[in-house]
Amino acid sequence: MTASEGEPGRAPRKDVVRNRARLLCAARRAFARNGLDAPLEPIAAAAGVGNATLYRHFPTRADLWQSVLEGPLLEVTELIGTAGERDDAWSGLEHFLRGLCELEAREEGFTFLMTASLDGAPRLAELRAGIRDRLGELVQRAHDQKAIRPDVVESDFAVIILSVAGVIEATRDSDPLAWSRHLDIILDGIRTPVPTPLPSASKACSALI
């Protein structure tokens, strides 16, 4: 890093901070839309900077992945840790799924990125593997407490999460909370006791049929 971009003990220039923020915003949108292999040059163009500026901030694609995804993955790690601390396994499982869907509603395309290959980004792969391990423990505890159907397996939750993410994407502009009803229906399909009262049906969803 040159003296113009920042030195140890000196705050980065405002334009350097601004360019980095723009690059991260553009990268997040591009990755959500086209996956983690989205070309980098259009990201720089969308951020209003040149390719040299992009590579100065993020020398490799994995560096850019980490800057975009590490924060949300750490948030999910904290979320599932909190879920696992609940004595009632069903409450913990519902807390995790609802929190993850809320994150997806806030961070467009995040759930789909959770399933992408992270070759070359060991830190991100480690975080995601930790989340999957904790989810497995949470599902097993729900089985031990007979809180979910005995035929529900851990891999079902990846499908559930992706399903809700699809509803979020389809109704993001017309009814941003439509996914909550969809998730309630799914949760009642996997739990064993009394169904949960549903919120009002979404008019936006009716228009999709």
Image: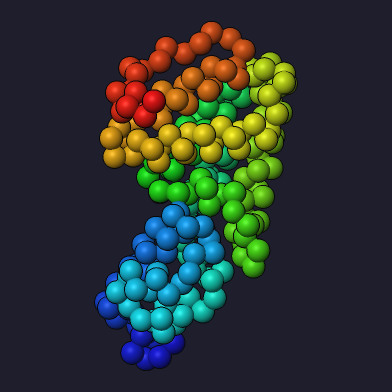
User: Residue 22: x, y in percent?
Assistant: 33, 68
Above or below — where is 52 with respect to 196?
A: below
Q: Looking at the image, which residue sits at the far front?
A: 209
Q: Does residue 168 appear to the left or right of 125 in the view shown?
A: left
Q: Choose top left, top right, bottom left or bottom right for residue 145.
A: top right
Q: In this picture, is 165 found above or below 92?
A: below
Q: Which residue reaches farthest top?
A: 194
Q: Which of 102 and 5 is in front in this view?
A: 102
Count of picture labels: 0
Residue 2, compared with residue 119, is above or below; it is below
Where in the figure is residue 109, as x and y percent of width and height?
45, 49
Residue in the picture at 64% in, 17% down: 147
Which quadrant holds the C terminus? top left
**Residue 101 visible somewhere in the drawing:** no
Q: In this view, does 92 lie to the left or right of 5?
A: right
| Residue at the extreme bottom of the image, as rendered | 3
The image shows residue 19 at horizontal and vertical percentages of 32, 74
Task: Give the residue at x 47% y 49%.
Answer: 110
* Residue at figure coordinates x 46%, y 80% from the top left: 55
- Residue 195 in view here: yes
Of 153 and 131, nearer the camera is 153
Q: Position of residue 158 (x, y in %)?
A: 60, 37
Residue 6's image quarter?
bottom left
